[in-house]
Image (spheres, rainbow, N blue to C red):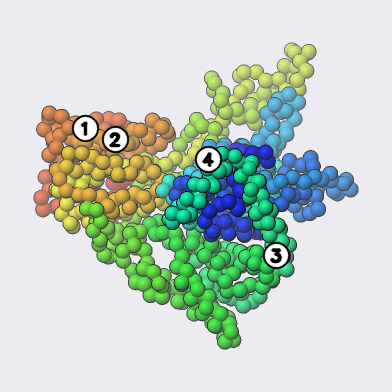
Amino acid sequence: MSVLSVSRPVYPFSALVGQERLKRALILNAINPRVGGVLIRGEKGTAKSTAVRALARLLPSITVVQDCPYGCPPEQAAGLCATCRNRTVQSETLPSTTRPVRLVELPVSASEDRVVGSLDLEHAITEGQRRFEPGLLAQVNRGLLYVDEVNLLDDHLVDILLDAAAMGMNTVEREGISVSHPARFILVGTMNPEEGELRPQLLDRFGLAVEIAGLTDVASRVAVIERRMAYEADPEAFIAHWQSAEGELAARIQSARDLLLHVRVNTHDMAAVAGLVLEMGVDGHRADLTILETARTHAAWAGRVSLTSEDIRMAAELALPHRMRRQPFTDIKVDETRIAAALERSGQQSESGSNPDEGVKKNSELGQQTSSNEDSGESKGSSTAPVSSTGSGQPNGNESSNSGGTTYDPSEMFRTRRLESQADRKERRSPGRRSRTRTTRKQGRYIRSIAAHRVTDLALDATLREAAPYQRSRREAMQHHRHRLILKRSDLRQKVRVRRTRNAVCFVVDASWSMAAEERMRATKAAVLSLLRDAYQRRDRVGLVSFQRDYATVLLPLTNSVELAQKRLQTMPTGGKTPLARGMLTGFEVLERARRQDPEVLPLMVLLTDGQANVAIGSQPPQTEAYQIAEFIGGCDIKAIVIDTEHPNFERGLSRNLAQRLKGSYYRLEELNDGGLVAAVRKQMQG
């Protein structure tokens, strides 16, 4: 965790080239924190982090209680912590000072104690008193919390941030201490979609979302290069050159903050927003509230005290994209033409004096009709073609040739089948990481304590309980010992933590001529896409290996982005001979590498093949070699599933023999349409 230093040079916000939507979303949050933060999605090298750090320098300084660790506002009784509130009750004048707004950066590797706070161990041991040591959420109160790679955070940290962001309060219970303190902050997250997606709960918590990409015109890219080189050559001179523009922007932000108090929302504005959200098919009410709050803020930024349709349209384009997502493999985009048309209809209904309830009902029905049309691949009432469930951009049920591969819609042939273990049914039925494991890291839920030869993660509560009965006798035996608490080595207890862990699922796909028949390859790709949906819901890491001719290719290393996996699958080349042994060995290497990096990961190989091998790595017959490699993998504690893609009329039992040597589950491709997959996979996952 780090707090942005005032003395460290920061690239000026005004010097950023392009990315107008990103800059607008950040400015609106700077004006009005109630907008709810912003999620910035985009490829690497698009100034995401630079923009966020630059924003903090534009915010006006705040007045805080001088000796308060939470930075309480002395003039607002509702925002005070318990200590400051007690001081005011006792008629004590709170000393105040001003300081810049803090930008606190949360690292992906942060521990739970560092985020929420912990017990001061030194004070407890030396003084015999329990004292709370504030964490990151205390420091960020009334500031900006910046989470780079927010999609890579552990689930338990995500839950903590969700609770604090929703309540504006952080409650900590540690070793018998219960502490609550204010934690109101602007949440700003950045992510690269190729590294995986966010949990829907966290996605919806961001008020706004912006999708950005690299600049596409030469002049803009040249301007980026020139400004960056000038900044790196002399940061102070470059910042001084842009100081005037920064001052004007900061003054405009402050002016908009002052004007925001006078911006009013009328019933017409509310009806327009409600009708729009219903027509776009967005669940819940957070979208309505966010759009109105954002539109108010944009009006203040424009110097107005009433809303226009342009304010609502702009707010909807920022607040709806991440809330409209229905399926794992659809792009996060909003049809701007459709938004404008919906707003126009809402305006006409209000101006004609029609019943607002009837207008909302009509919009709702139209939204359901449009959603149904999109699900079936039609494009009514929209200026852009809907995205299919595979994310290919092709209407559902159609195919398109692409670099030797073919795009298919799995929903036509297969329903999603869960890769579940028995523990899944006991511990978690909703989407989320499928497996729970004990961990030696200082991350995860603290569930109990044990005596250990080497204590690396001290369970202070258990240690104090263990030492308490002996304190009187120890003081009598050590009369000159001045410490209030006397501990011995035998008192120390180690924390036992559990955390949910991902499976590492590597799909190994036979792409040879024996699989190249259109119907079989269509079914194979559809089966993989169906299983990818489950991997998406369970946040597994997914890899993809294909083998054909005389080589195996890692089309996708293990990643959280199953969307990237399905794109690679769609363009997978086919044809040639069948190097089955090399394909399995390559898949094994991918999983073994993951296990070396994280011993807690649970590896799973899903092999789709007809079982026939005709290319060998060495001098042995290809089929014999493939069986030997399978036996080797079967002895390495890697779970395996074999999906037999051979046509039923020509079954030779090759894949069944392969599954036996892999010590894995076996079933035919045709069985994916019934409960056979669930039963077989559960059996294999239980091991």
List the residue tagged with mark 2. Answer: 588
* Most foreground residue, 438 or 594: 594
Please state if 515 lies on the left or on the right of 314 as rendered: left
Please state if 101 lies on the left or on the right of 389 as rendered: right
**Image location (x, y in percent) of residue 156:** 54, 43
3D distance between C-alphas at marks 3 and 2: 59 Å
* Most foreground residue, 240 or 108: 240
Discs 2, 1 touching: Cβ within 8 Å: yes
For the point 71% across and 20% down, which residue is it?
A: 486
The label on residue 330 is: none
Q: Nearer the viewer, mark 3 or mark 1?
A: 3
**Vertical side of 328 occupied by 283: above or below:** below
List the residue tagged with mark 1. Answer: 629
Q: Amino acid at mark 2?
A: Phe
List the residue tagged with mark 4. Answer: 108
The label on residue 260 is: 3
Query: In the rendered image, which quarter contains the N terminus?
Result: top right
Q: Amino acid at mark 4?
A: Val
Please tell me which of labels 2 and 4 falls first in the chain: 4
3D distance between C-alphas at marks 3 and 1: 68 Å
* Most foreground residue, 178 or 220: 220
Task: Give the secondary structure at mark 1.
Answer: helix
Please tell me which of labels 3 and 2 falls first in the chain: 3
- Residue 355 appears in the rendering: no
